[in-house]
Amino acid sequence: MASRIAVVGSINADLVVLMPKLPDRGETVTSSEPKWFPGGKGANQAVAAARMGGIVCMVGAVGSDAPGEMCLAALKSSGVNAEYVLKTTAATSTALVMVEDSGENQIVVTDGANSAVEVDAELLASFDAVVAQFEIPEPAVLQAAKATKGIFIVNAAPVRPISEELSALIDVLIVNEHEFEQYGKPAHGLVIVTAGSKAVVAYQDGEVVAQCQPKKVEPVDTVGAGDTFVGAFAVAYAGGSSIQAAIERACAAGALSTLKLGAQSGMPNSGAVDVFMQG
Ligand code: RIB
């Protein structure tokens, strides 16, 4: 049976600008015409999970504006239930996404409707897994954690302090290598560390329990690759896959997602991941 996943998180309109090399501090660089894409770590993870075969519900907030409509349309067209996305008086949150020719990126996210996310405890209690990130306020993440009856997965990005109360409720923590350095190695629970094209490592109570080297691809845009990993992992793990099997599937999905410009554009469906893994 398909995994039932709720994503409690951010929805952003991404303004993407391309450049040969990301600017250094104090440096000005030029770019071709900017492009708008649907994004936000929460929405990206919801879309990734839905494309990987999950039954997915997004809990978030957008403004009553054109960027909000773009983001909602993207969720719906991937089959995500967007009924629990609030429409607020605040503008849809925006992310300025700078992508250099190598595929590396830098992102600035503005405050906006993401601050208004509301958690419905009764709704969340019915899902196999609930996924949250840190682009929404801490109280919303904590409420989601308390309401979850299934697996509570946190993608602790961007980095911010994790309270002891929240930490005790997290079943799976997913971070990238830079975030891992800043948080330090947690001694308890399942912690998965992604590292771009390098191996993903899963720690259980501080010991390595699974690893996966992503297959090599020529990335066009790595924005959203981590989110694709999280969404694909959630679907596989909540569906009963082992940690090793779930990270292998998530690695494959993450690699494929980098082949198109825009966080959600390249996110693969489950059939494409099967083919890539066999190839
Ligand atoms: O993880 C990628 C996402 O981070 C982008 O889509 C952007 O919106 C920022 O939230």
Image (spheres, rainbow, N blue to C red):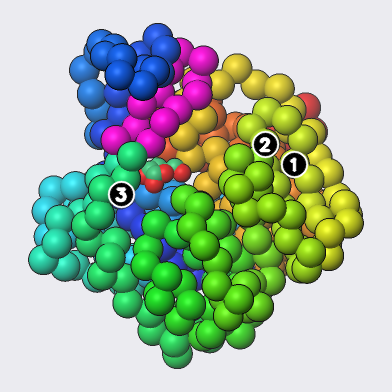
The image quadrant in which ligand 1 is located = top left
Looking at the rendered structure, the kind of residue marked 3 is Asn
Q: Which residues are magenta?
A: 96-107
The answer to whether 28 is drawn above or below residue 206 in the figure is: above
- Residue at image point 44% right, 87% down: 121
Counting from the top left corner in percent of width and height, residue 33 is at 21, 17
Density class for disc 1 (Cα within 10 Å; few <14, some 14-19, many ≥20) is many
Q: Is residue 47 visible?
A: no
Circle 1 — which element? strand
Give the Cα distance between marks 3 and 2: 23 Å
Counting from the top left corner in percent of width and height, residue 111 is at 25, 54
* The furthest residue to the bottom: 122
Is the CB of the residue bearing disc 2 within 8 angstroms of ligand 1?
A: no
Residue matched to label 3: 12
Counting from the top left corner in percent of width and height, residue 115 is at 28, 65
Residue matched to label 2: 195
* The furthest residue to the front: 26
Circle 3 — which element? strand
Frontmost residue, 184 versus 274: 184
Q: Earlier in the sequence, mark 3 or mark 1?
A: 3
The answer to whether 93 is drawn above or below residue 105 in the figure is: below
Q: Looking at the figure, which quarter contains the C terminus?
A: top right
Q: Label 2 near label 1: C-beta < 8 Å?
A: yes
